Image: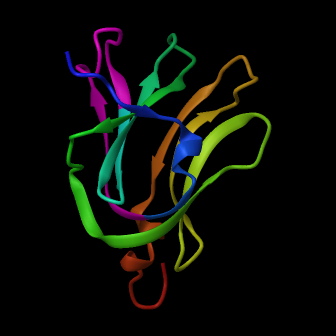
Amino acid sequence: MEETRTVQLRDLVGDHILTGVDRLMNTDTDERYEQVAVLNFTLDGVTYSAIEDPDDGYRSLLDEIRISDRVPVNIFEPVCVRAQMRAGDDCEILDLVDLENGQVILSVGTDYLDDYYPNFVANFDPRKMHINKVGGTQ
């Protein structure tokens, strides 16, 4: 049986090259889950799969980030990003910031950690990447 390699959000802090992202609903990530959201993103040639823990019908969390062999559906020109932990006591979220324009283009983690309803965060906004700037505006 192949060992699953996982990383923590904080392990990804630093400067990277982002080249691919996709988000999907997956039913075969693990036998523990029925259907979960998965955000796949490629940094420095390594693809990471951020997998939701659905907890119950109202709460969700980031369960784990696995190193994956998956190739994201959306592949694009390399973008230099800085991965940084979002400030705040009630969240554990990693933001990827486009180094050229300072925009947050990808966020992953858990928001409202200390609340009754924590929330899995898996956001990607390609419009905020400097490579998608059209006609001088975004």
Q: In the picture shown, does residue 25 fall above or below 60?
A: below
Percent x, y for residue 88?
A: 78, 43
Quadrant of the image occupied by residue 50: top left
Who's the residue at 74% across and 22% down the image?
115
Q: Residue at x 52, y 80 (%)?
A: 100
Foreground residue among 132 and 29: 29
- The spot of residue 70 in percent (x, y) is 21, 42
Range shown magenta? 17-37
- Left or right? Give the position of 34 relative to 58: left
Please identify the quadrant where the N terminus is shown.
Answer: top left
Residue at 27% across, 26% down? 26
Name the outermost residue toward the right.
Answer: 89
In front here: 95 or 112?
95
- Is residue 28 one of those drawn in magenta? yes
The image quadrant that residue 92 belongs to is top right
Is 27 rendered above or below residue 93? above
Q: Residue 76 versus residue 137: which sits nearer the camera?
A: 76
Which residue is located at x 76 percent, y 34 percent?
90
